[in-house]
Amino acid sequence: MTTHIVALGGSVLRPEGDNAASETWFGKLRQLVVHIEGNGRRMGIVVGGGSPAREGIILARNSFTDRYRLDNVGIAATRLNATILQQSLLDIGCDVCPIIPKSTDEAAELLTEHHIVIMGGTKPGHTTDAVAVALARDSGASHCVIATNVSHVYDSDPNKNENAKPFDIMTLGELSKLTGDTALEPGGSAAVDPIAVNWAIESCINLAIIDGRDLKILEDAIEGRPFVGTLVKVE
Ligand code: UTP
């Protein structure tokens, strides 16, 4: 049975402002999940922290700077967002696991019992991108879709360099050269978490980096159709 793994960036699920657009997006996401479950497939969704994680970490930094503790604040926000999505899918009768797993091996096990498993972060030291790659590894999926709020991986920061060039396809080795191998700061952001890239290399997981604000693109990437974004192949 096919299992799809998606990292759903918190910045996509919990964007700043524009509630109407957010509501429409949420409705379409629920339709997509219903469609996948209806075809008898399984899906693990790892939800990011978005604005609650950023706000929580900024607030907490006023009191302490320990990285481990700040990461735990971020993890709590990812689990809040995961619960929102989980409850909204349970509400429309989807076969969603009623537990938010705390590890990827627990989530992989639960994916054998439910069509849909939703989780957030696991341990300090990485982001939910890395959790999604670990879940792909543990559930035997060869691909992981990383749905974020940029259209592609670029050769430099498109916010700082107007000539930044997007990649349609690249290897994990090339992506690793761009991201480096230093873990992000708590609440820090990058197109893809360097730890996720390392784990994808270790476990031979192909990645698709896409703009999750457009659910047609997410659907294309999940269905294995050509998609707008960056395909990152093992080699
Ligand atoms: P996110 O996974 O949301 O970071 O984790 P992100 O992908 O950069 O941001 P979005 O999802 O696009 O908005 C938020 C923070 O939570 C902690 C880290 O501090 C991270 O920066 N975290 C998350 C962990 O420590 N471990 C985890 O497994 C997940």
Image (cartoon, rainbow, N blue to C red):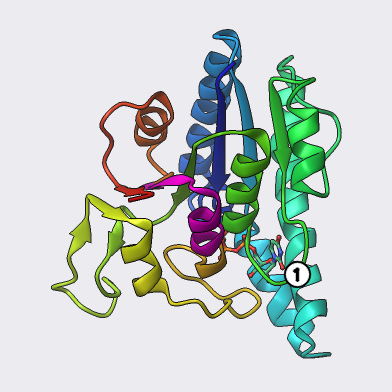
Residues 80 and 153: in front is 153
Segment colored magenta: 196-210
Relative image position of residue 124 (x, y in whole percent): 75, 69
Residue at numbered disc 1: 124
Could you tell me how many numbered marks the image carries? Answer: 1
**Residue 48 figure quarter:** bottom right
- Asked whether the viewer can see residue 16, the reply is no
Q: Is mark 1 within 8 Å of ligand 1?
A: yes
Residues 171 and 149: in front is 171
Residue projecting furthest to the right: 99
Task: Name the kind of residue labelled 1 in the image.
Answer: Pro
**The N terminus appears in which quarter of the rendering?**
top right
Q: Residue at x 63, y 63 (%)?
A: 127
**Residue 65 figure quarter:** bottom right
Ligand 1's quadrant is bottom right
Relative image position of residue 62 (x, y in whole percent): 77, 90
Can you say whether 151 is above or below 223 in the image? below
Other-residue count near label 1 (Cα within 10 Å), few / some / many at <14 / 14–19 / ≥20? some
Q: Is residue 182 left or right of residue 150?
A: right
Q: Is residue 181 left or right of residue 121?
A: left
**Residue 48 inside the magenta-drawn segment:** no
Can you say whether 160 is above or below 23 in the image? below
Relative image position of residue 190 (x, y in whole percent): 46, 70
Q: Is residue 115 left or right of residue 151?
A: right
* Circle 1: element type: loop
Q: Residue at x 25, y 31 (%)?
A: 226
**Residue 170 figure quarter:** bottom left
Q: Residue at x 55, y 46 (%)?
A: 8
Relative image position of residue 5 (x, y in whole percent): 57, 36
Q: Is residue 82 left or right of residue 207?
A: right
